[in-house]
Every structure is written in C-alpha cells, then in structure tokens.
Amino acid sequence: MSPGAGAAVDPIRPEPLIYHLSNVGADLEAGEPTVGGLMTRSIWAKFKTEAAGRIVIHTFGSEINTVLAVYRGTDFRHLIRVIANDNFHVPGISSAQSLVQFNTIANSEYHVQIGSRAQTEGDISLNTFLFPPTGGLSAFLIHYGGNLTNPFNGRDYSCDISTAGNLRCPSARFIVYNSTDKTLTVTPSTTLGAGIAFPAPFALAPRAVKVVQFTFQSSFSRAVRTSFGRFVFKGQLGAKLITEATHRAMVVVRPAVPVQDLVRATSNTAVLAGRLNEGIPFTVKLTNTGKVAAIGCHFRSSLSADLKTQFYRWDPATGKRLTNNNVPSTIPAGQTQTFQVYLSSQSSRDADHIDPESIADCANNHRRVLGLGGIDISTSGFAERLPVLWAVANVPANGVLNVPATGYAYYTFRAINKATTMKLNVLPAYVGPFDDPANTTYTVALCRTDLSTGKCLNAYARSLTYTATKNAAFGFSVRVKAPAGAPAFDPDKRRVFVNFKQADAPYLHLAAPSVAVRKH
C-alpha cells in the first residue's frame, strides 16, 4: 500500500486517502521495532515524497486499539523513527486510536507501521491527509446517524428519503483536526441547502481536535431531486482563509409514489484494475423507457461500500464532456444519455462484481436501478505493474447465462494483458450466497482456445497457468454445469467469475467479466 504515491496535494482543499485494512494473521518479524514494546501484529506501508510537505495519519474508525509509527530508512536495521503514537484522545469518540503528524523531506522514503496493543486483531481504518508544509484542516466522517458504536470510516455521505412521512436524513458527525501551527477560526457550513443545523464558528488550536455534527431539520426541502454537495470546514487566520476541508455528500428525495421501472442502465462488460484510491473509469448508458422525464439521474456507491464514485455526462460521438463532475441529469422520455463513471476503492478487492455496490439511480424512479452488468473491479496497493485485461464474451446482452438442467452451458472470451508479460493462474469460480445448500452450487471449468477455430487446446479443468504475453490475445472457454437443486435466480448474488492471479504476486487478483447464471 502506498499512501502518498502519485497523490496530488491541493494546498487549500486536500482530499484524504483512506485505506480499509486488517491485521488479522499479522505478526512481528525478527528485529522489527515495537515502539517500546507496545506494537504487536503489525502491517507496513511505504511511500516516497516528491516534495516537502506535512502529513497527518490517523486510525479513527478502527475496531481495535491501534499503535502507529513512522520511520525513514531502508530496512529494520537502518530505520530512524520519525514519530509514533499510541492513544490520541478525541472526546466522546475514542482514546484507543492513534494520530501522527510529521513534516516530510522531498524525495525521501517513509515507512508506516500499523499495529495493535496486546495481540488484538481486526479491521483498521488508515486515514491519510497530505498538506503543504504549513499544514491544514482535515475532516473525517466518523459517524452516520445515531449509531455511535459503528464508525462510518470516511465513506461518502448518502441519504435517500421520500417526500412523504417524517423521515429525515441521518446526522453526520466529523472529527476536525488542525495540523497547522496557528490557532484557526473554523466555520462549518454545507452546500446541500438550508435546513441543516451545525455549530457556530469555533477556535481550534494547533494539534487539537473537535467533534462537529450536522443535523437535518424538518425544514430541509422535500422537493423531488438529487443533490450533490459538501460538508465544508473553512479555517481562517483573522479574515484570511488559510485552509478548507470538505467531505462529499448526496441526498435523493423521491416522490411519495415513484414511477416504476423508469430507467435501465447498461454497460459494456469489462475488467477494471488499479491501485487503492485510484479512479478507474467505465462507461454507462442510462435509457429512459418510461413516458415521463427521469429526474436527478446519477451514480453513487452504496452506503456500506468501500467504493467512492464520481461521474459526468459525455457525448460518445464527439468524446466531449457535457457536464462537470457529479451533476445529476434529467433524461427525457425515450432518450438515452451516456456517462463516464469513475470508481475508486479504499480496500483491496478480489475481482468483485460491483453490483449492487455501485448504483445507477434517478430520484423519481421507484427503486435503485442496478444491473450495470459485467463490471468487475480489482485493486491492489502493492503491485508495481497491473495487468489490464479485457474480454468479449458470447453471453446474451442481459448478462445472463441460461444453464440447462442436464449437460452444459458455455461462454467464451478473449483476454489481452496490456502490462508487461507475466505468468497468470486462471481459476473459474461460482459465487453464491454463503448459506446456500451444497446441492445448489454450479460447477465450472475452463480451457484455453484457438482464436481462429474456437476449439479447446486442453481438456476442461478447474485451473490452468499460461504466460500472458504483453498485447497478445488469448482465448478461453468456460463450461458451466447446473446443480441438482433448484437455486433461485438472483443476478446479483449467483454469478460465475474467472479469476486471474499473478503467479509471482499472489496478492494481485483480476477477473474476466462475470455472468449471472440461471438454471433453465
């Protein structure tokens, strides 16, 4: 994982890099520093700075008692500790998490050690903020609504309400930290509109924190719409704006009786690969199949997802962008609009199918519009080079493979590695609900195929290995057998994947586009 690699620093509005990690199964290596015996079960990250700056790293939102340390050097025998912290107290939030602040030297390599107290294991939220040398404000969304026992871990704020009833959007609670060397006057606000209560301006000393809450009131507008905005924290020294921290937010207000099945989302099957927190693009078309205009059409990540989503509308004929980022669109009846969507993941993902974590939706539709179809995303924070695979499959346009009760169903695809030549292990897999009975599991196998004839070059098998030459196409055939039982059809939960794993780097997984399977 590389918290600082390639990250651009905005001196006024830095965006955090958030990594959802785990130290389950981790341990100390021989000769590893322990921060005076406090550090256990450590994991490591490293980054190299391009310019001098100030960095804040904290672990608020983690489920275990954490310890943080930062070093310069090349290995355990030559590490020089820059800073370490065990417990950083945030009133009403936590005394068991850690925060470090330090200045960096240009073109220097830093190592971050993240561990726990007393051998505890669990999920860790590593939250990194990059500033110019003078520092700035950071704002971290720690709680969503009234559930104070379940940290929100910096995810995008999202609210979905109706014009009917008294339901309000959940409150948003932030940890605001001042990494400058000056006492700042901090002014909270929001661009989501009137009807949201938040504190008056307050003073925040250097290295101090304050918990700030935004609460939606009954006066918040119930007009049918999709609103994208931000929670904002302006830090001033006198009358001068010094720094500004923001957090993305979205509110959808639906009519009391939404239109049914108004919009359909379609996309090309694709495999997407990238680093943690790197935006990965794909194209989606939204078609309004109804008789009324679709209002406030947009893309977002589900509330529990580790994904962040941004989008804009564009013209595929000219390649020109038609809107700024995250501008909801109205689609007239019978028309189609095309969007470029960017997903970035805060955790390593083993070629997961993005449905239902990435959502296409319109405010006056009766439900979330899923079915983005065949988009799989794989991220890694460790690989120096990532294979980029694409595939063309003979699956119907709806992305569903009908499997006969007897015999087999097949689909083929070709994969091209756009990175350096490497050896890949290929393993087909069926993924279904964990509580499905054993007799409802589909059986899958595959073979390499001749691109000109389509015939198998080897017997169908549960796995194979091949050398993926750069820019060369390789064909595959996937064979699927139906189970004896009768699993319900669920295109989001019962799918067939083909996983590609880099043979010499088992932490990097990719996948060919997945398909939904249905016993027919």
Image: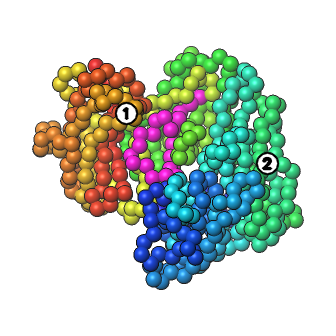
| Label 1 SS | loop
Q: Pick whichever of labels 2 and 1 is earlier in the sequence.
A: 2
Please give the residue where the numbered disc 2 appears in the rendered image: 189
Residue 495: where, in percent of width, then height? 35, 33
Residue 105 in which image quadrant: bottom right
| Label 2 SS | strand
Question: Which residue sits at x=46%, y=35%?
Answer: 355
Report the amino acid beneath label 1.
Gly
Please give the residue where the numbered disc 1 appears in the rendered image: 432
- 116, above or below 219, in the image: below
Question: Which residue sits at x=45%, y=43%?
Answer: 282
- Taking the magenta stretch, the answer to whether it contains residue 347 is yes
- 489, above or below 345, in the image: above
- 402, above or below 320, in the image: above
**Predominant SS of the magenta segment:** strand
In which quadrant of the rendered image does the C terminus lie?
top left
Residue 118 is left or right of residue 206, and the answer is left
Residue 31: where, in percent of width, then height? 44, 78
Residue 49: where, in percent of width, then height? 54, 73
Residue 393 is left or right of residue 356, and the answer is left
